[in-house]
Amino acid sequence: MKFDAHSTAIEGVFILKRQEIGDQRGSFSRLFCAEQLQAYGWNETVIQSNMSRNVGAGTLRGLHLQLPPHAEMKFVQAIAGRVWDVAVDLRKGSATFGQHVAAELSAENQMGLLIPKGCAHGFQVLSDSATLIYHHSASYQPEAESGVRFDDVALNIKWPLTPQNLSPRDQELPLLASFGDGVTL
Ligand SMILES: Cc1cn([C@H]2C[C@H](O)[C@@H](COP(=O)(O)OP(=O)(O)O[C@H]3O[C@H](C)C(=O)[C@H](O)[C@H]3O)O2)c(=O)[nH]c1=O
């Protein structure tokens, strides 16, 4: 079983399509493979895996990242429904600082987004509900949690639907300008 990888405009952000093998009983697919993902920069242990269950088209979570020394890589996949998944480059010295890439992730298209340290992640639900699985290379450290506002004009993210259901925290996240010239990793 192999992941079909596609690079993006942001270095280190990859779209990885998992393989699904079906038969008369249903199907089998691999959600993570350390050996294969090394080729796309994942050279650390999976420390935590999380599940995000979401209801309501338009629901938006993010854009979040953990700051050093707890910066983390994430591999995000949809196992039910459809989301518009976004990564924003906040790395100091990156040629794409402040830029973002987006991809539709769904149970059907089997796509996942590999997000390197120093990039913020967020998504918007496109279906009535959606469930995401995350693999993380670091543990959750609330004191290291940061993020950038989903509607910051400096990011110019064209969310497909009217954003809904944002948490109070997400509504108050800082703007890109507050990151100066970026996160030092
Ligand atoms: C992320 C996380 C959260 N929590 C607790 C903290 C809260 O009590 C509750 C919900 O947390 P939060 O509102 O931060 O969840 P999301 O807004 O979905 O955050 C996630 O959504 C964006 C899009 C991401 O990329 C991150 O994985 C993550 O930040 O779960 C934990 O106990 N462990 C965790 O790893």
Image (cartoon, rainbow, N blue to C red):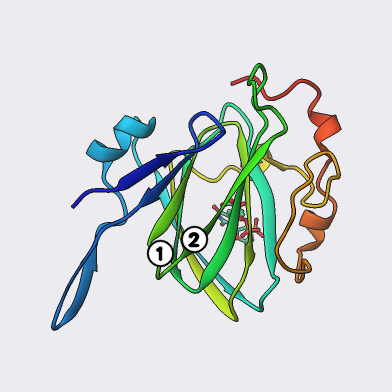
Please give the name of the residue rendered at 34% of the width and 30% of the height, measured from the top-left corner.
43
Q: Which mark is residue 105?
A: 2
Q: State which quadrant residue 141 falls in.
A: top right
Question: Which image quarter has ligand 1?
Answer: bottom right
Where in the figure is residue 12, as x and y percent of width and height? 48, 31
Q: Which one is in front, 23 or 49?
A: 23
Does the rendering let one see residue 166?
A: yes
Where in the figure is residue 164, as x and y percent of width and height? 77, 70
Q: Residue furthest left?
A: 24
Which residue type carries mark 2? Leu
Please give the name of the residue rendered at 37% of the width and 33% of the height, measured from the top-left corner.
40
Please give the name of the residue rendered at 38% of the width and 48% of the height, measured from the top-left corner.
16
Q: Which one is in front, 158 or 144?
A: 158
- For label 2, the SS is strand
Q: Which one is in front, 29 or 68?
A: 29
Q: Which one is in front, 54 or 154?
A: 154
Within 10 Å of disc 1 (Cα), the crowding (few <14, some 14-19, many 20+) is some
Mark 2 touches mark 1? (CB < 8 Å) = yes
As drawn, 151 above or below 57? above
Q: Quadrant of the C terminus?
A: top right
What residue is shown with label 1? 109
Q: Specify whether tag 2 is near ligand 1 (CB below 8 Å).
A: no
Q: Residue furthest top?
A: 93
Q: Which mark is residue 129?
A: none
As drawn, 170 above or below 125? above
